[in-house]
Amino acid sequence: MRVVVAGCKVNLGLRITGVRENGYHELDSLFWPLPRPCDRLHIRETGTAGLTVLCGTPGIDLENNTLTKAYAALAKRVPDLPGLEVRLNKGIPAGAGLGGGSSDAAALLRWLNSRVSSPLDDQALAEVALTVGADTPFFLINKPCRVRGIGELIEPCRDDALAGIHLVLVCSQIHASTPQAYADYDAALKASDTVSGQNCLTKTESKANGTFLSGVRTELSIHNDLEDVVFSRHPQLAEIKANLLRLGAGAVAMSGSGSSIVALFAHEFHVESQAAAAMLQGENRRVYAHVL
């Protein structure tokens, strides 16, 4: 049996730049991979055809999920896939904007591609990954990237762009629905031509945010266009953000369509970042601290 670890990602900024005819939203975002929280795939070759997925986490559809989609998509391009049983141990919370399902799919695609007699090249494997989910091609690279379009335009960034920055990731038990977030955004945009920006750090709350990010070698800010509408449904998330700002974070924003909240602390505020992580840890929250 082989154990494959699938990490997560956070969005350090998310701009909605358009909507395609099929309803998919085009984005511009900085994706940053993190090793924790993570999922683990326990993979066993069965000697029979197809894929069987096992998972003890409630709510996981064992017949139709990103792993089964990834296997089926690769099978269309590669004829000699081994039969597998995959026991999925979930550590990445669902509905948190961390890309857990996409990461699982990418991990399985990489592993399978390394096992076949005629593996796909990087571009072909990325094309397969995109049919599984918009974030899946990024996880094949698993390095800081600027991601645009619906996830197909991926531009790797320097991995030292945030060197020394302390990142605190707060995961609550709130499940934020991605379709609902985009529907709410579209409705708000139609009603007012623009989302108010009331909760957006780059527009209000902290003048320090601009100063903090001015030294970061990326042209993206940490502003998230979905934050207002998700916070309106889940005001507890706005409270987490406010607490992180109060505790000394230089920049705070929601990751993806939520519900996780990401805080960046300058390296000289490492004590404050540790205190914030300890204070926000609780029965209904999991907190992860990283040094980038």
Image: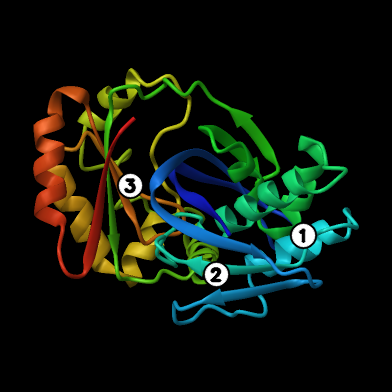
Of the residues tagged 1 and 2, which is closer to the observer?
A: 2
Report the residue at 81% width, 48% height from top. Answer: 116
* Of residues 3 and 35, the one drawn nearer to the viewer in this rendering: 3
Question: Cβ–Cβ below 8 Å for labels 1 and 2?
Answer: no
Residue holding disc 2: 87
Q: Earlier in the sequence, mark 1 or mark 2?
A: 1
Residue 55 screen position, x and y as percent: 51, 75
Of the residues tagged 2 and 3, which is closer to the observer?
A: 2
Q: Is residue 120 visible?
A: yes
Residue 174 image-quadrant placement: bottom left
**What SS does tag 1 mark?**
loop
| Residue type marked 3 | Ala
Report the residue at 66% width, 58% height from top. Answer: 133
Q: Is residue 280 left or right of residue 49?
A: left
Query: How many other residues sit within 10 Å of disc 3, few (<14), some (14-19) or many (≥20)?
Result: many
Mark seen at residue 200: none
Query: How many other residues sit within 10 Å of disc 1, few (<14), some (14-19) or many (≥20)?
Result: few
Q: Is residue 12 visible?
A: no
Using the image, determine if residue 18 lies above or below residue 163.
Answer: below
Mark seen at residue 253: 3
Question: Cβ–Cβ below 8 Å for labels 2 and 3?
Answer: no
Mark seen at residue 21: 1
Mark pair 3, 1: CA separation: 29 Å
Mark pair 1, 2: CA separation: 38 Å
| Residue type marked 1 | Glu
